[in-house]
Image (tube, coloured by chain):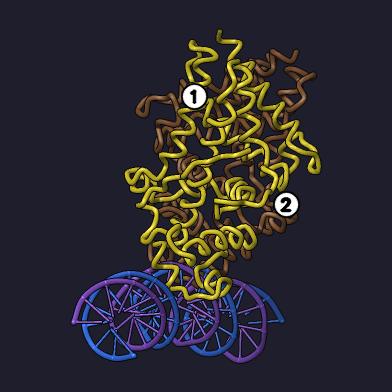
Chain colours: A yellow, B brown, C purple, D blue
DNA sequence: CAATAATAATAGTATTACTATTTTTGAAGT
DNA sequence: ACTTCAAAAATAGTAATACTATTATTATTG
């Protein structure tokens, strides 16, 4: 697959654009690894600064706080995923196949490939989305963050999925809710599968096939019944 | 409604049982209000101690940290909700009606009534579940917390709902995933409705009627299609 | 009513989350 | 090559947070 595009990040997210310097890229890329390793709650700029051999204050010159770094990475992932959706849907004409493709893209953990252009690892970003993605909006700053348009990539992705849903069945009344439901459930079921398996019916070791099947039933029977 | 029961809390949750003392009950009840007011991230035992006119150290004698207090309240809510489910399903024979009742109980914010026996406010607990409920398990302690059986009430509730699902349609392959999906989506859609309305199709001011309808379609069309 | 156990308050400490100030680096002009 | 000056990063802080050890107070029992 060749994805050739440039993700434009919201500049409210950072104090200094991390893409522009070696240190900035290191903060984001290694920050992502460290958060996944020790958990967002335990993650501090101090620990990251030791890891990448710089100082706390230098990191603060790029990001206001660790929450903004989290939103930066998660937001990047939503934009990246939207591009992937555009790319994979490009040649498809069947609306059902389009939705099935979207569900797979959201629910399946990407296999690690050596990143080329991007300094952010896709598979690490997917892990972070599953374990900490909802923390971006489950915060007291949500009103301000929303005004700063930080959730635009997530809304754009939902909006795009909602359009495909409406094309499949224009009578269906809840395309946006169904779109956000697909995303949220794909991630929460993946999380439960790994950590609280009794809340699911998926075997822990196996891949996401059953989850994809579960989501397909959920989505298509809803959309069929209201045709 | 008369619910007459005693919720038995897991004693791994606290260092000293808060139900046994006036101070303990104040910590939980007022803690819940304060978390809802300022947000879990901004909440500290110091701030709570000022609010209820005691000291930080006294609160630490009851709860190891603020995360445990959060889990205490959320866990209490799951147990309370399971009792409510038992109570409301008691006289029902129709399986469809049972599931519809469950969906309503989960999705509708309870109207505040003066609590009698319980020192925890049900409607405040519901608000907390919507905004911070998932933070109980989205933490690095999940493996240890799970071993301490902290998520038992949530699992029990899901298990009970899964049973009703299986009774309605014994062929359906994902009763547990569907049960946890109902709970997670009811709360995340309620949260989005309030904070990021473009991710839903529900008008902000109106009650949960449309959300209930959305969930009903989702659940029953899935269950019908695989009969 | 003294002994002792339970409870809570005082007074700490280490870490976290930042910020102000100083130093270093590196490019531009002379 | 050498100064100038601005950008970048490091040093050295501070206030708040998340706890803990110690001391004091209160309640209970022999």
Decide which of B100, A12 is in the foreground and name it.
A12
Q: Is disc 2 surrounded by few (<14), some (14 to 19) or many (20+) residues within 10 Å?
A: some
Residue located 59% across and 51% down the image: A116
Residue B11 on image: x %, y % = 68, 57
Within-10-Å neighbours for mark 1: few <14, some 14–19, many 20+:
many
Question: Which of the pair C29/A2 is nearer the observer?
Answer: C29
A15 vs B183, nearest the viewer: A15
Of the 4 image quadrants, the one containing the N terminus of chain A is top right
Q: Report the chain holding disc 2.
A: B
The reply to whether label 1 and label 2 mark residues of one chain is no
The residue where tag 1 is placed is: A162
Q: Is residue B179 left or right of residue A132?
A: right
What residue is rendered at 47% in x and 70% in y? B56
User: Is A33 on the left-hand or right-hand side of A45?
Assistant: right
Whole-Å distance between the Cαs marked 1 and 2?
39 Å
Does residue B68 show up? no
Q: Is residue A112 above or below residue C10?
A: above
Give the percent coordinates (x, y) of residue B126: 50, 40
Which residue corresponds to the image point at 50% horizontal and 62% vertical from the top-left? Answer: B23
Residue behind mark 2: B149
- In-image side of D1 versus B67 (left or right): left
Q: Pinpoint the chain carrying mark 1.
A: A
Location of residue C30 (image quadrant): bottom left
Quadrant where the C terminus of chain A sits is: top right
């Amino acid at each position: 697959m060749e994805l050739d595009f440039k993700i434009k990040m919201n500049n409210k997210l950072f104090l200094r654009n991390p893409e522009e310097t070696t240190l900035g890229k290191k903060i984001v890329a290694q920050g992502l690894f460290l958060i996944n390793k020790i958990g967002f709650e335990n993650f501090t700029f101090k620990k990251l600064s030791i890891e990448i051999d710089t100082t706390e204050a230098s990191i603060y010159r790029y990001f206001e706080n660790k929450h903004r770094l989290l939103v930066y990475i998660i937001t990047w992932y939503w934009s990246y995923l939207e591009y992937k959706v555009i790319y994979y849907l490009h040649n498809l004409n069947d609306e059902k196949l389009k939705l099935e493709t979207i569900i797979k893209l959201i629910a399946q953990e990407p296999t690690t490939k050596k990143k080329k252009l991007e300094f952010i690892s896709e598979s690490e970003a997917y892990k972070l989305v599953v374990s900490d993605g909802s923390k971006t909006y489950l915060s007291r700053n949500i009103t301000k963050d929303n005004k700063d348009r930080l959730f635009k990539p997530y809304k754009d992705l939902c909006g795009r999925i909602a359009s495909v849903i409406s094309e499949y069945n224009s009578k269906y009344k809840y395309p946006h809710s169904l779109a956000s439901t697909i995303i949220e459930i794909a991630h929460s079921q993946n999380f439960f599968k790994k950590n609280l398996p009794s809340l699911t019916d998926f075997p822990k070791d196996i891949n996401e096939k059953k989850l994809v099947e579960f989501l397909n039933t959920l989505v298509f029977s809803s959309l069929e019944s209201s045709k």
